[in-house]
Amino acid sequence: MTRVLVYIDESGMTDASESVFTVSSVWCCPSTTRGAQNALRYTIDAMKPVANSFLKSQKKEIHHSDGLGQISATLLETALHASHSDNSILRGDGIILKEPLCWRTVDFSPEFEHQIANGNEPCGNWIRARSIVSNLRPLLTFQKNGKFEVGVVLDSEVWGKALELCKYMILDNLKDKGITISFDFERSNRIPGLQIADMVSGVARQYYRNQKEQDAFDLVRKHSFEHLKPIQRPK
């Protein structure tokens, strides 16, 4: 059965004082069932030497906020190039993504969202819940033509309440599409896909907030997607 992994991470805060909060998802089809921590390991290992050479450090984890904005385009190019040689993910015909590695990103203005918020639930949880739904839109709009499994990995349990707010709507939408979905919380230091999602979110936020990192943001736009491809079954 076709499997998809979706890694979700954010940049910024949902506080009322924040002008931009971005949430991105990195998508791939794993080639094995060994778990979310193994997919994209080759790709992140190709990115680390580039980051550490620039930072003159030996960091074990990639974070945009460590000062990697100046080389964000190079890092995203490295990720895209390495993904075509990464044996932990599918790269050939039959996958339902347009590329071996692709992503989505969505931005919010917490400053504005807090002004129009109502109800008892903290506004930040609703922002996060809506960002989950927006990032999973390709699944929610997918036309039923075959069964597949999706594993969504969120960066830490700060997403717990937000997931509660939207999980059952997502499950209800997918139940007749032949799509099985599960959600997990993980630490980014264990999960390569979360570190790549961190880079994408950081780039998008810098562009939307400060009009910086144009070259990197062009890559974000170029390799973003709206729709899944139809599943190609063996003849």
Image: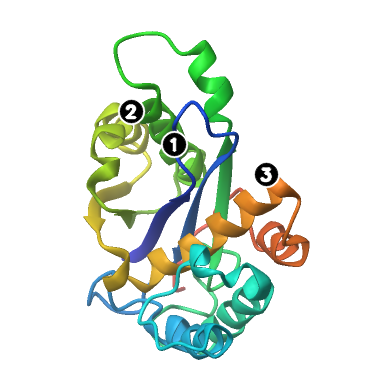
Residue at coordinates 29% horizontally, 27% vertically from top-left? 165
The residue beneath circle 1 is 133
CA–CA distance in space, label 3 to label 1? 22 Å
Looking at the image, which is closer to me, 210 or 168?
210
Q: Is residue 217 left or right of residue 62?
A: right
Q: Eyeballing the image, is 230 above or below 35? A: above
Q: Residue at x 26, y 62 (%)?
A: 187
The answer to whether 6 appears left or right of 106 in the picture is left
Q: Give me the C-alpha separation between circle 2 and circle 3.
A: 31 Å
Left or right of 52 on screen, residue 208: right
Horizontal and vertical percent position of residue 178? 33, 46
- Crowd tier of the residue under label 3, counting other residues whose Cα lies within 10 Å: few below 14, some 14–19, many 20 or above: some
Q: How many marks?
A: 3
The three-letter code of the residue at mark 2 reads Met
Q: Position of residue 52 (x, y in %)?
A: 49, 86
Disc 2 designates what residue?
Answer: 169
Q: Amino acid at mark 3?
A: Arg
Amino acid bearing label 1: Val
What SS does tag 1 mark? helix
The percent coordinates of residue 20 (x first, y second) are 59, 38
What color scheme is it?
rainbow
Q: Which numbered mark, 2 or 3, is in the foreground of this view?
A: 3
The residue identified by callout 3 is: 209
Residue 163 position in % (x across, y down)? 29, 36
Sequence order check: which comes first, mark 2 or mark 1?
Answer: 1
Q: Residue at x 56, y 87 (%)?
A: 50
Tell which of 186 and 234 is nearer to you: 186
